[in-house]
């Protein structure tokens, strides 16, 4: 028989960790009722991998954003290591942030809290007044949960249309999305690389490829944009969020999110680095430029652009970002069928407390953006989501636990 749990959290990234520390701060006793699942069996595996793979030296977000409920905890932790907070606005160095998260995990006694396992299916189970959820793991085991939080990151690669029109077969590693690239495993000396996209990841990839002695071109479909953060800091408080939450029309909320994020941008510091490399002839940046056709000619790419120009490359890296679409989430297939809800351009219209209407499933991350705002996917979004979730989860935890196990 499947074992039962009060609260299952799927994923053990920064969002899940933020939620668990917030719940424990509110109610220590909830610890024994939570089960966290992640294929890695540990915390922040994906987060650490993405920073290491691109050699990212520091975060884009300031030191106030992290998984501990005390907003000042990272600053305090960094006191003996001030040189690891980068200008402007004290951006934590990657190692500092990882060490801090390790400290959070120890302080909250969460070292052994993650169960190794990938959830492959969520099935609603009829129950007296609210359904429970049956979670299936990849190894065939299953578990029944009274409530579930989906904190899997859940984004889909954004792939430009011209990729599906490539007619010549090509080696997979010669055209890939940025999230599949691990610079530590590549030898690029003398290679010509095209990076498509104008976000910060393009900058990291370009600097990484240059350090491996490659030549880099960057195509940006509009002008290169410089912004300190993904979205303006006004989106972290009432300045913009008041109007966002007052907006009853979720299509308008979606537009507000899109305008606030406004596509990819690099930081001013990355801008300085890229311009320096451009002056030295190592990088060429083509603005208002898009690929219209790509052909693999046996051992190199021939690219045609919207400006009628042609270029040759050894590799193409798609730094074209990710998007969130509830319909592309296999884990949500049964839920969508059993409990249909409104979806606006891929984003589900959740209840105010991030609950899926009619069913004890809560979403965190980018899929919760219509109730959190443009920073839903970021560390700041994790805190905002946790504040909503802790109220919903702790409040409904008053149902006696014996009743769950009955
Ligand atoms: C390169 C990069 C840099 C970033 N830098 C910043 C930054 O500086 N500041 C900021 O605020 N944001 C940043 N972000 C955005 C965001 O904070 C991160 O993407 C963050 O990792 C999101 O956390 P998460 O917990 O939602 O997802 P993830 O970190 O992706 O964690 C999700 C976890 O869920 C697990 N999982 C997935 N599917 C399943 C399943 N079916 N069953 C069980 N487990 C599953 C995965 O293994 C993973 O460990 C960055 C993003 C990228 C890509």
Image (cartoon, rainbow, N blue to C red):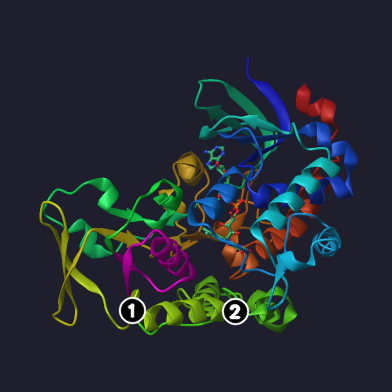
User: Which residue in the protein does label 1 denote?
Assistant: 281
**Disc 1: residue Cβ within 8 A of ligand 1's nearest atom:** no
Tell me the element at label 1: loop
Which quadrant is home to the N terminus?
A: top right
- Residue 210 locus on image (x, y percent): 39, 65
- Residue for point 71% across, 83% down: 239
Decide: few, some or many residues near mark 1? Use Cα within 10 Å; few <14, some 14-19, many ≥20. few
- Residue for point 26% across, 52% down: 174
Residue 247 makes an appearance in the image: yes
- Residue 99 locus on image (x, y percent): 74, 50
The range drawn in magenta is 193-220
- Residue for point 47% across, 53% down: 326
Image quarter for residue 192? bottom left
Image quarter for residue 131? top right
**Lateral position of residue 35 relative to residue 265, left or right:** right
**Lateral position of residue 9 relative to residue 272, left or right:** right
Was residue 194 drawn as part of the magenta stretch in this picture?
yes
Give the CA separation, mark 2 to mark 1: 26 Å
- Residue 105 locus on image (x, y percent): 77, 43
Tell me the element at label 2: loop
Number of callouts: 2
Image quarter for residue 130? top right
User: Which residue in the protein does label 2 denote?
Assistant: 228
**Lateral position of residue 117 relative to residue 17, left or right:** left
Considering only vertical position in the picture, is 119 above or below 168? above
- Residue 117 locus on image (x, y percent): 57, 29
Observer-nearest of 27 and 162: 162
Residue 321 makes an appearance in the image: no
């Amino acid at each position: 028989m499947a074992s039962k749990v009060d609260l299952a959290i799927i994923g053990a990234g920064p969002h899940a960790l933020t939620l668990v520390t917030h719940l424990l701060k509110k109610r220590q006793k909830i610890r024994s009722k939570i089960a966290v699942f992640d294929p890695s069996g540990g915390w922040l595996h994906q987060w650490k991998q993405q920073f290491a793979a691109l050699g990212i030296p520091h975060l884009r977000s300031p030191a106030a954003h992290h998984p501990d409920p005390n907003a000042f905890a990272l600053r305090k932790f960094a006191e003996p290591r001030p040189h690891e907070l980068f200008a402007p606005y004290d951006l934590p160095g990657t190692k500092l942030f990882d060490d801090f998260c390790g400290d959070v995990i120890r302080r909250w006694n969460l070292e052994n809290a993650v169960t190794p396992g990938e959830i492959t299916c969520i099935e609603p189970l009829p129950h007296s007044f609210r359904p429970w959820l049956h979670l299936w793991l990849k190894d065939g085991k299953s578990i029944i949960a009274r409530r579930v939080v989906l904190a899997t990151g859940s984004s889909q690669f954004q792939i430009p249309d011209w990729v599906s029109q490539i007619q010549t077969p090509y080696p997979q590693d010669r055209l890939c999305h940025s999230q599949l690239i691990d610079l530590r495993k590549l030898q690029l000396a003398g290679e010509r690389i095209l990076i498509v996209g104008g976000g910060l990841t393009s900058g990291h990839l370009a600097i990484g490829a240059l350090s491996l002695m490659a030549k880099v071109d960057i195509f940006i479909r509009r002008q290169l944009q410089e912004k300190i953060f993904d979205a303006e800091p006004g989106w972290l408080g009432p300045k913009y969020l008041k109007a966002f939450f007052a907006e009853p029309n979720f299509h308008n909320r979606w537009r507000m999110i899109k305008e606030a994020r406004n596509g990819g941008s690099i930081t001013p510091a990355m801008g300085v680095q890229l311009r320096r490399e451009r002056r030295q002839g190592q990088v060429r940046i083509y603005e208002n430029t898009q690929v219209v056709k790509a052909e693999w000619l046996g051992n190199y790419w021939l690219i045609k652009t919207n400006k009628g120009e042609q270029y040759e490359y050894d590799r193409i890296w798609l730094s074209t970002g990710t998007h969130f679409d509830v319909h592309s989430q296999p884990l949500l297939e049964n839920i969508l069928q059993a409990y249909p809800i409104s979806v606006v351009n891929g984003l589900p219209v959740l209840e105010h407390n991030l609950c899926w209407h009619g069913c004890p499933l809560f979403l965190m991350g980018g899929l919760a953006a219509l109730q959190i705002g443009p920073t839903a996917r970021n560390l700041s979004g994790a805190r905002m989501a946790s504040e909503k979730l802790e109220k919903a989860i702790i409040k409904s935890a008053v149902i006696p636990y014996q009743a769950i196990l009955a």
